[in-house]
Structure formats: C-alpha cells, structure tokens
Image (tube, grey):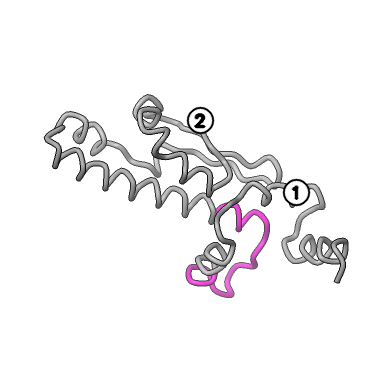
Amino acid sequence: MNLDQAKTLLINLLDCGWLDLQALEKIERDFSEIIEYHNDNYGDSQKISLNSLLDINFQLTLSEINDFIKNKIEELEEDGEEDEAEELKGMDVYQDFETYINFIDTHIWLRSNQEIYEKYEKELEPIFDRCGYSPF
C-alpha cells in the first residue's frame, strides 16, 4: 500500500478530510493507548473517528494532569509547604481546562487557575508534549 492509499484509508476510517489528519501529527502519545481507551470505554457503541481520538487524547491528558496534582500535593506536604499544597487541593482539572474538538481546529485552554498552572508549566510540559496541544 502506498502513502496515498494509506491516507485514503485513514480519512475513510476516521471520517475526516486530508488536511484534518494534521491534527494527529502533533500527538506524541502512543495511539494504541488511545485506541485501547476507546475500546475499553466505548466498545462498539461509538465508531472511532478523528474527533473521538482527539477527545480521548485530551481525556488521557487531563487524567495525567490530575495525577500530577495529586503527586505534587503529597510532595509539598512532605516538604512542609502546606500553603502551596492547599492551593492545589482546591483545583479541579476537569473544570479548569476547556477543550474544543473540531478536526484541525482542535485546541485546549485554561478556563481558570491559569496562574497556578503556570507555576508548574515546566513540570507539566512533558504531559502536554505527549498530548500535542498546550494551553500555555
């Protein structure tokens, strides 16, 4: 199969256009992880599409950020930095971030607590690198 045939196959399987495939080029996450998540959570009830892959990528990213915050709270508490730990305890990743999924126009941004997330931007960078999209 040549590259054009592979692209044709992808656009038909993912229900998108040629240019829309660029939305996947940014993602560094292993796509088998995204597909596994889809199959575990949606099974046959939802067809895999470009938008569903992008949505799952964001869901996995937000889950990783949530884990980062939990670990950071523990680390700060162990170091006696209670004020910073308390600041993080009041955060809700799923409320703080907003995503927009529309093929090539897909993006993620911070809706609230931007100043707090910016404090940890360097530590969050690897998570957003895997995601392929960043709010910073």
Secondary structure found at label 2:
loop
At 52% from the left edge and 64% from the top edge, which residue is drawn? 33
Q: Residues within 10 Å of mark 2 (few under 14, many from 20)?
A: few
| 47 or 68: nearer the viewer | 68
Q: Is 47 on the left-hand or right-hand side of 60? A: right
Q: Against 83, is 8 above or below?
A: below
Give the amino acid type for the residue marked by disc 1 in the picture.
Asp
Q: Quadrant of the N terminus?
A: bottom right
Q: Which residues are magenta?
A: 39-55
| SS type, badge 1 | helix
Q: Main secondary structure of the magenta part?
A: helix
| Residue carrying label 1 | 20
Amino acid type at circle 2 is: Phe
Q: Give the image location of residue 79, x and y in percent.
A: 14, 37
Q: Nearer the viewer, residue 47 or 18?
A: 18
> Earlier along the polypeptide chain: callout 2 or callout 1?
1
The residue at 56%/60% (across/down) is 30
Q: Position of residue 42 (x, y in %)?
A: 53, 69
Residue 125 in picture, x, y percent from top left: 46, 39
Q: Which residue is mark 2?
A: 136
